[in-house]
Amino acid sequence: MIAAGCDVGSLTAEAVILKDGRICASKIIGVRALAALSAQQVMEEALNEAKLCFKDIDLCFSTGYGRYSIDFAKKNISEISCHGLGAFTVNPEIRTVVDIGGQDCKVISIDDAGMVSDFAMNDKCAAGTGRCLEILAKALGVELDQLGRLSQKAKRGVSITNKCSIFMEMEVLYHSYAGKKIPDIAFGINQAVAKRVASLARGIKIREKAAITGGVSKNPGVVSELEKLLGIKFTPLTVDPQIVGALGAAVFAHNELLGAQGRQQLAAG
Amino acid sequence: MSTKLKQIQEIAGAVKNPFLEKAMEQKKPVMGYFCNYVPEELLHAAGFVPYRMRAVGSTGTARGDTYFTAINCSFVRRCFDQVLSGEYDFLAGAIVLNGCDHSRRIYDNWRDAKKSGLPAPEHLFMLVAPHVLRESALERYEKELKKLMQGLEDAYGAKVSSKALKASMDIYQKRHELVCQLYALRSQKIPAITGAEMLSVLMAITAVPVEDANSLLEKLLAEIEGRKAASSDDIRLMLVGGCMEEPEHIALIEENPAVVVADSLCYGARLLRPPQKDEAKEPLAALTRRYLFHPSCPRMINDFDRRKEALFDAFNESGADAIIAEKLMFCDLWGGEIFLLRKEAKERGIPLLGLEREAYGGGEGQIRTRVQAFIEQVQNAKARKQQAANGKEAS
């Protein structure tokens, strides 16, 4: 039984293929101009890895901002539900998921079946998302994926006090012109983004164990600052945290194939 | 689709409509008004066709932004943009109400625009309604209504007799009863009308002469009886908020397995003004009480408890599963209200999703995600409740 999930976001697209409930392939790509093209490409790559073709997929569900444009998906499910179930599938003890993606962040509370019981999502601005980090990394003149590593070398981290991405960018430039060291500014950037996410998380009861997913979860600077601010330790996931949304979509598809009565515990890996 | 519904949607989707044009051909003056505290009956009795101001068809805020700031609500900016583009040049006059600080500025700005030769009707009026709900406020409200009546008489020679007012109240009472029948069809187990359609109906009946509105409602009721506009499995929603005049926004919510079965909106339950128990016999006094004590919005600062009880009563009566409470960006009144409602809903175990949006556009992707996730959350909770109930029965 082959179930698949496809998550097309604002910056990346992911596909996960489950064979009899186990992950047999997953892929991440940068998005293309159209969501449908991103979906097609990422799924083809995942199928190649699994040595399968489109007609082998029994059921595929989509998620993410491009979820409506994916022709080969039979149903679309919100990324909030997918990240919840995806993280729960990897570790059934997870009760809170913090997902920080390209253009939004969500704090998701899940029940003992991996289903969403409450959530909060940024609505007013992009501060606290991958896009904000991207802008600030550019202002600092470093690659986005270097921010986390750089901030770990900080000795006197700067404090970025603005809450708006644009003003944060100006503050980064100010610190840069003032001759502050790059790792110290990188620390300030990660801390500022973590503060925005923590402020959102306060609207939800954080229950442990908690996991962090999405592209920003790969930035250790943001993750460690967020842990400090929330007073928790994120449980590491045994899969790439960026594929958790696509995994959730695939698990929803798998469960539908099994039927509500036939749900089984899935093993990731 | 019902032919009447299609006609109603066409009326709701445009500033002008054939009924209004026919009335104007018959030399009936059209009086634009803002907010639910401007008594339509009074305007009708004075010989006007009351027309609720709207921003329908708005394509931007460029003109509106020359008078309003970017931190004024998008409804006000869009509506005033329409005003300045001449969309409302058919109005004989307009009445602005101190509904909130954003909308009340329309009066000042419109007067100023008029002086500059920009599109404006011959007469503009400001009606000041009390911001509190108590017996002593009745006197002040009635005085303001009398001032408005005098203003209409001075400007147009439109004198309102008690007899004419009573007759107008009877016609509007009929509209009220017909809308109540529609609400009953909407809240039945399988609703006969969706939330998006209902909004179109309520927009349409406030843009045509009331006699035509009543005729449209009667025909619509006959047409949709027995209609199944949703599935019995759909999540039943109550929609709460202030200004909402985009049926497509509700349609976006109803794209999910969900249907809006109840509301507390300006173009919604707040249009219902049932006769009050202790109404005076004299029509103006009765009308004053009816309008002051009708289901209020957060502009009435001392009425939260009554408002909240009415809201949750309507929620329970309609068999709704959850609430979506919406506000326009920069609307402080609804911001505070939703904050309080969230707490009340939590205590009652009612799922509530708060949404912030701009009138006519923006943020569709985020709204879709939020609403879809919320519906999924409510479905999960409902399924678990059902499972628990089944388990209890089995044991």
Image (cartoon, rainbow, N blue to C red):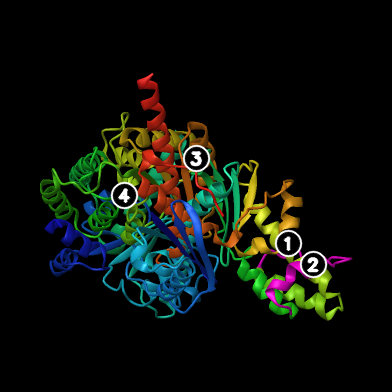
In this rendering, the answer to whether A71 lies above or below A110 is below
Q: CA distance from mark 4 to mark 3?
A: 53 Å
Q: As shown in the figure, which amino acid type bears the numbered disc 1?
A: Pro
Residue B388 seen? yes
Q: As shown in the figure, which amino acid type bears the numbered disc 4?
A: Pro
Q: As shown in the figure, which amino acid type bears the numbered disc 3?
A: Ala
Q: CA distance from mark 2 to mark 3?
A: 37 Å
Closest to the camera, between mark 4 and mark 3, is 3
Q: Earlier in the sequence, mark 1 or mark 2?
A: 2
Q: CA distance from mark 4 to mark 2?
A: 63 Å
Please report the bounds of the magenta region as a residue range. A142-164
**Residue A260 % position (x, y):** 37, 41
> Which of the numbered marks, if any, corresponds to residue A113?
3
Q: Compare residues B317 and B26 and report the one nearer the observer.
A: B317
Residue at (60, 66) in percent of width and height: A126
Residue tagged 1: A220
Residue tagged 4: B39
Q: Earlier in the sequence, mark 1 or mark 3?
A: 3
Residue B98 seen? no
Closest to the camera, between mark 4 and mark 2, is 2
Residue tagged 2: A151
Q: CA distance from mark 1 to mark 2?
A: 8 Å
The reply, left or right, for residue A227 in relation to residue B61 is: right
Q: Are marks 1 and 2 in contact (CB under 8 Å)?
A: yes
Q: CA distance from mark 1 to mark 4?
A: 61 Å
